[in-house]
Image (cartoon, rainbow, N blue to C red):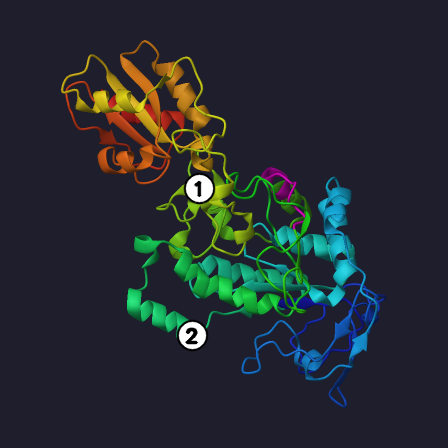
Amino acid sequence: MAFAVTSSPAAISGSSFSRSSASSDLKIAQIGSFRLADRHATVNLSQKRCAVKPVNVEPKRNDSMLSYAATTSAPEVSEKVEVEDFEQLTKELNNASPLEIMDKALEKFGNDIAIAFSGAEDVALIEYAKLTGRPFRVFSLDTGRLNPETYRFFDEVEKHYGIRIEYMFPDAVEVQALVRSKGLFSFYEDGHQECCRVRKVRPLRRALKGLRAWITGQRKDQSPGTRSEVPVVQVDPVFEGLDGGVGSLVKWNPVANVDGKDIWNFLRAMNVPVNSLHAQGFVSIGCEPCTRPVLPGQHEREGRWWWEDAKAKECGLHKGNLKEDGAAQVNGNGATTESDIFNSQSLVTLSRTGIENLAKLESRKESWIVVLYAPWCPFCQAMEASYVELAEKLAGSGVKVAKFRADGEQKEYSKNELQLGSFPTILFFPKHSVKPIKYASEKRDVDSLMAFVNALR
């Protein structure tokens, strides 16, 4: 984690902090003062602190977010606890700008808060922090499997802002055990959760145990299935902070209400460095084996773990965004009652009986193209406009355009009989062939879909 502390030029020798070159008028008392001559830390505390004791999160490790100077000794101080109503604060800040939210976060938590930097467009967070003029800290998770471009971007960001990013690494023994038992690419076969847990979630957990709050780049428009209700500030529902226990960590999301295009307008206006992968079609950037460019008609999160079900594409860092299955309203077919999609008079809605009969026909009067979908799937939602336009273009052409809802009780049948791998799956039923042809491309724009149809009809 990079710690950029705007203060006087005097460096803290031997600590993991770096000082940015911003205003020297800011007092170090905002984040605590350190006296290293006698290896003793004198801590200035706000009235929101209760009991602050010497902290050493993992005695056998030296990768905590706390500096050595801050963990060796500190006076025990007991003060009256002041409970913060973060739900009310969320309401107050809901219409605030990202800069105002960032300023409030840094003001409230000082040196006990840090920005989580992934190496993508969330560099905007660092720019906002710099613009506040307050001290700020930055950390990142190095999984060991990032793209070369991301590593070069980290270096560029450090030089641009005059900071040092402190990287959190996975436990070498855990990584070794995983790779030796399952190989380097087991996530393609049994899902990404186990690998993410070892390489990302556990290192993050260690990092957050040295903080009272953290700042993320989550936006509501990033993943309609999991992030549509992200608040600007919340008590972290998953991780624990420095004081331990439920409610000991606060999570700030300053750009929660900002559209992706506005983030990019801001980055261009401020002329800040960006990851070169963005120019190659990458939007959401993670580990190299699990990230790829998105194509026309695709949602940005479809570039992550594309071989898996699209309903819950989270690596575990923001697991609190996922809704429990039991919380969903269910209809008589075992499917969620969310609003349907692909609604057009040019589209045929197939029932289970309808799709079964279509699949059994050896000779059809017309060819059919059918999308197997789930209305909650953000990637189905992303291609809705293209598919509806395709239906309108093919009206009266001898090719029927249809949809079949394949989640809930229909999912098992669709997997066994209709080649469903993930949502959406597109099938073409030729006039004179029983077996449907699966659309293999990830390009779901109307021109690509039309080329697929024209090649087969």
Locate the C terminus and report the quarter of the image it occupies.
top left
- Secondary structure of the residue carrying tag 1 is helix
Q: How many marks?
A: 2
Taking depth in this image into account, of 151 and 58 the one nearest to the observer is 58
**Dot 1 surroundings within 10 Å: few (below 14), some, or many (20 or more)?**
some
Q: Which residue is mark 1?
A: 311
Asked if residue 260 lies left or right of residue 310, the reply is right
Q: Could you tell me the amino acid type at mark 2?
A: Ala
Q: Position of residue 433 (x, y in %)?
A: 15, 23
The part of the chain drawn in magenta is 253-263
Dot 2: few (<14), some (14–19), or many (≥20) neighbours within 10 Å? few
**Residue 277, visible in the rendered structure:** yes
Which quarter of the figure is the N terminus placed in? Answer: bottom right
Q: Residue at x 76, y 52 (%)?
A: 85
**What residue do we see at 53% from left, 56% from top?**
317
Q: Quadrant of residue 237?
A: bottom right
User: Where does label 2 land, which residue?
Assistant: 172
Residue 380, above or below 268: above
Mark 2 falls on what kind of element?
helix
Report the residue at 72% width, 70% height from top: 19
Q: Quadrant of residue 110?
A: bottom right
Q: Position of residue 224 (x, y in %)?
A: 53, 38
Marks 2 and 1: which is nearer the front? 1
Q: Quadrant of residue 62?
A: bottom right
Q: In this orientation, which residue lies closer to the viewer: 102 or 278?
A: 102
Looking at the picture, how far across and down is residue 80, in whole percent? 83, 67
Residue at horizontal 59 percent and vertical 48 percent from the top = 218
370 is within the stretch colored magenta: no
Q: Amino acid at mark 1?
A: Lys
Q: Is residue 363 above or below residue 200?
A: above
- The answer to which of 405 and 300 lies nearer the viewer is 405
Do the residues bearing badges 2 and 1 touch, measured as CB atoms within 8 Å? no
